[in-house]
Image (cartoon, rainbow, N blue to C red):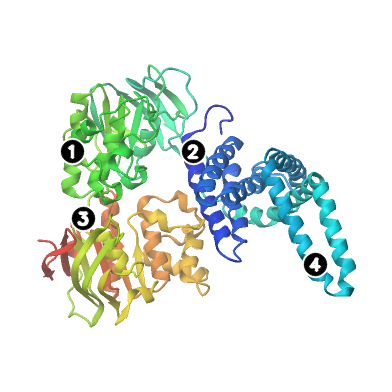
Amino acid sequence: MSTTGPLRPIELATGAVLGGVTIALSVLASIIPFAGGLQLLAAIPMAVIVQRHRPRALLAATISASMVAFIAGGLTVSLGVISCAVLGGIVGDVKRRKRGLPTVLVYSIAAGLASALASIALLLILASSRELFFATVRNTAAGLRKLASRAQFLRPAADWFEGMVAGILHYWWFWLGVSVCISVIVGAVFSWFILGAVLDRLAWLPATDRLDAPPDPRSVDPVPVRLTDVSYRYPGARAEALQNIDLAICPGEFVAVVGHNGSGKSTLARILAGRPPTTGTADRPGSAGLGQRGGTAVILQRPESQILGVLVADDVVWGLPKSQHVDVAAKLAEVGLAGLEARETNSLSGGQQQRLAVAAALAREPRLLIADEATSMVDPAGRNDLVALLADLPKRHQMAVVLITHQESEAAEADRVVHLQAGRIVPQVPEWVQPAISPVPDHPPGPPLLQLSGVRHTYLEGTPWATEALHGIDLTVNRGDAVLIVGGNGSGKSTLAWLMAGLMAPSSGTCELDGKPTTSQVGQVGLAFQHSRLQLHRATVGAEIRSWGGPSVGSGGVGRALDSVGLDRAMAGRSIDELSGGQARRLLLAAILASKPRLMVLDEPLAGLDPRGRREIIELLAQLRRRGFTIVVISHDTEGADVLCNRIIRLADGRIAQPDLVGGGPR
């Protein structure tokens, strides 16, 4: 970790997100009665910042968070955020340095003295406020003395109390300093045992930015870039992710990099974006300038993870200096989003979000644009449009475009195609021979299990930003069914999945599982998100399955769950971060099965997988259906579903576009 230079993107992002969490918890602690314990929880995000990054990241987060907290909740909340930063900073820094309680005591004494001096200085500066507060305390003490004096035996105690208050106020600077110092020391020691245990539990979470690169003092000039005998091995890995790569990228080129999952494509993208190789050389005229004007821009797989602005126009210029003029309307028109400047970004479809990411990249006038699996979450029509857009950019700008994909068909418009296999450049990626999957035999429909009647759903209902996602859905899923719900981006598929799982209630209509609302039976419907990694929260494969299955799932139960999805039992001890995309999806299915759901709803289970990974997941789902599981697959891709699903429902603009197709798969 670099100890010099400005804050890195991951430090800024971590500080912004975790600082926001601290603000939220501090505000809740101030407005909810008897919720003061939340203030201790609010110190955890600050501790995480300084444990994983430089102290200056904590300082930046503290300054910005305290200012926002002052606006949101006033001086009390702002001071609460600062106290969280002090306590969290002490514990996090000691954990990062791998020290113990004695270091906490040294830090806390220093912090206590500094806090005491700061508190005294603040009251000296705010003389009027100080005197007003002191007058309130004196009047309160005098009032209590008068009340107590009505009872003869309480007069001595009342006189003593009033005198004590007067003495404390006379020497207020001493008493304030001592109390602040002691409270910081006691709070730090207490936090060491509480927050320290939490940080130990969170230690397994990854905290690296795989696009991060060391500072390069040269001027920004990323292309042409030439890789010579480049290899790369991740820390702790047993083998190289890239081996002996020789490659040149020149301005004006549209280059496609094609390979299966795990072939090293994303690692190659990181090297091109400025990450130094383990061995070999990456030569370019200047620095890669990731995110800088005239440098390198990267568009990632998940479009929503790249959107920061509330409005489309705001997102295009997010993070750019005000002095840099950007013709937002022209950039949006260039990517096919003309006239959408005032649209809210959360109302865009997946394809539109990726186009917005391209517009935001173009606003930085990049010389090198890398699209890393940027088409994988987009429907087929949007995918073709996005590839055509990327292919056209080098013709209109002095730039090179690199498209990373596992779809050979997307490379048709490229000037050159680079094929990767097992980290090496090969003449052609061998086609994987896919043996046929035996179709699942049709069975007579079972009794109704899930019923939706007149379901409508509106986001932000009752506000000027209300958006209706579903319009009167009527649907019945019978026991033993495998239903495929297809539709383009923005058709309402994911909204429907969340309603089926009971995570949201419909705005109108009913969604019932065995006659009861799904919202009252959360967990009975197993929902797999589009991005399986978002649902995997434990350190290891076995721990993840046990967390879903409950206390009754021992090592035998973990093994059986792994068997059910075709994973080796030896993987139980593997870190989740070591899994491929296909393995992560299988693990999520194993975890869902361990929870014994009555229905499985899988949202885009094939997205981002290469042909082999797709075939393996389809075969797995077919096996589950043969065993009697009821499955709903939600996807924009119908390829291979004919062996799995007995019914297909097409969604368009939040409505069922045509009747069910029964017993024949896609037509």
Q: Amino acid at mark 3?
A: His
Label 3 Cα crowd, 10 Å radius (few <14 / some 14-19 / many 20+): many
Q: Residue 317 placed where, x, y %? A: 33, 34
Which callout, 4 or 2, points to the residue nearer the camera? 4
* Residue closest to the eye, 413 or 46: 46
Label 2 Cα crowd, 10 Å radius (few <14 / some 14-19 / many 20+): some
Q: Which residue is mark 4?
A: 146
Residue at the spot 74% in from the left edge and 48% down from the top edge: 180
Q: Secondary structure at mark 2?
A: helix
In the displayed structure, 86 sits above or below 318; it is below
Label 4 Cα crowd, 10 Å radius (few <14 / some 14-19 / many 20+): few
Which callout, 3 or 4, points to the residue nearer the camera? 4
Report the Cα–Cα distance between label 1 and label 4: 75 Å
Label 1 Cα crowd, 10 Å radius (few <14 / some 14-19 / many 20+): few
Mark 2 / mark 3, whichever is N-terminal: 2
Residue at the spot 76% in from the left edge and 56% down from the top edge: 138
Q: Which residue is mark 3?
A: 636
Mark 4 / mark 2, whichever is N-terminal: 2
Q: Which residue is mark 1?
A: 338
Report the Cα–Cα distance between label 1 and label 2: 31 Å
Which part of the image, by quadrant, shows the N terminus? top right
Q: Residue 66 placed where, x, y %? A: 56, 44
Q: Secondary structure at mark 1?
A: loop
Q: Which residue is mark 2?
A: 12
